[in-house]
Amino acid sequence: MKIAVFVKQVPDSAAKITVENGVVNWGDAPLVINPWDEYAVEAALLLAEKHGGEVTAYSLGDESAKEALKHALAMGCAGAVLLSDPALAAADTAAVARVLAAAAQKGSAELAVFGRQAIDWDSGVTPSMAARVLGWPALSLVAAVEALDPGAKTIKVARAIEEGRQVVEGKLPAVLSIVKDFAEPRYPSFMGIRKASQAEIPTWTLADLGIPAPASAVETLELSAPLAREVSNEIITGDSPADVAAKLVDKIIGEGVL
């Protein structure tokens, strides 16, 4: 069984994001694999280990995205592919979904595995949009795969929803998006890191995928930082709790809150 796992390169979650002259800047913070995608890689590897098969990691971006792919290789993925083309520089989520779907098809994947969302844009819709393009079932918010039969082309998963767990069944090929409940991501081994550092990662362009440049439905016209808010605080003291409470009530009434 061939499994495709999709990862993204994002700024470190501790980065302080700013907007300067319409350009997003995260200072000296490193670029890392999207934290949600580590859970997707772990899920893909566990499924391959249990049911047989191999996992290939894919990432869309420029040359820097190869670092996220190397992280996936170090965790245990058998291969990795960079999806890169100048025509994708301004691609929105819909356009990205079409490219990822084409990569899954070119790689003959039977499962396409995503993290729940990316921490930069936080839209969380790419897995479902890719499934729509592929015409595959979209099994989102997967916390566990309860049954998988590659021969019968069936899969049963438990979804983590607000009301609890929802068990659903679907046919393969399918798209999964993984949540943190699935399993704790493994640490890359020393040998895995060494192997990943020496790996040759091929690049697939739109021509390699056999698709034209997908049109974007959304265009970013302007980026600006949110307005800074002036925040101040005042500590109210008194001789007793009742005295503090009385002063607080007077303050609230004086400010027009009540």
Image (cartoon, rainbow, N blue to C red):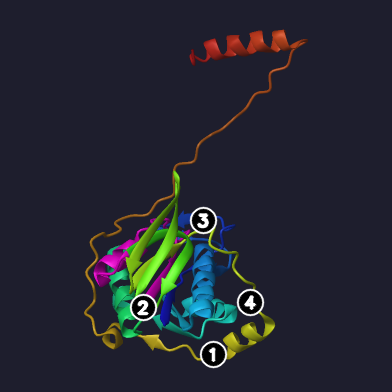
Indicate the secondary structure of the residue bearing disc 1.
loop
Q: Nearer the viewer, mark 2 or mark 3?
A: 2
* Residue, disc 4: 188
- Taking depth in this image into account, of 144 and 86 the one nearest to the observer is 144
User: Badge 1 is on which residue?
Assistant: 199
Q: Which mark is nearer the camera, 2 or 4?
A: 2
Q: Name which of mark 4 and mark 3 comes first in the sequence.
A: 3
The amino acid at mark 1 is Ala
- Tally the marks: 4
Using residue 130 as the reference point, say whether residue 183 is left or right of it: right
- At a point 52% along the width and 15% down the height, the residue shown is 255
Above or below, 13 relative to 44? above
Specify the amino acid type for callout 2: Glu
Specify start and end residues of the magenta stretch as a single range: 111-137
Q: Residue 37 at what x, y percent from top left?
A: 49, 67
Residue assigned mark 3: 17
Instruction: Specify few, some or many for label 1: CA neighbours under 10 Å numbering under 14, 14-19, or 20 or more.
Output: some
At label 3, the amino acid type is Ile
Secondary structure at numbered mark 3: loop
The residue to which callout 2 is attached is 110
Q: What is the quadrant of the N terminus in the image?
A: bottom left
What is the CA distance from the residue labelled 2 to the residue labelled 3? 37 Å
| Residue 85 visible, this angle | no
Q: What is the spatial separation of the Cα atoms under label 4 and label 3, in whole angstroms?
A: 28 Å
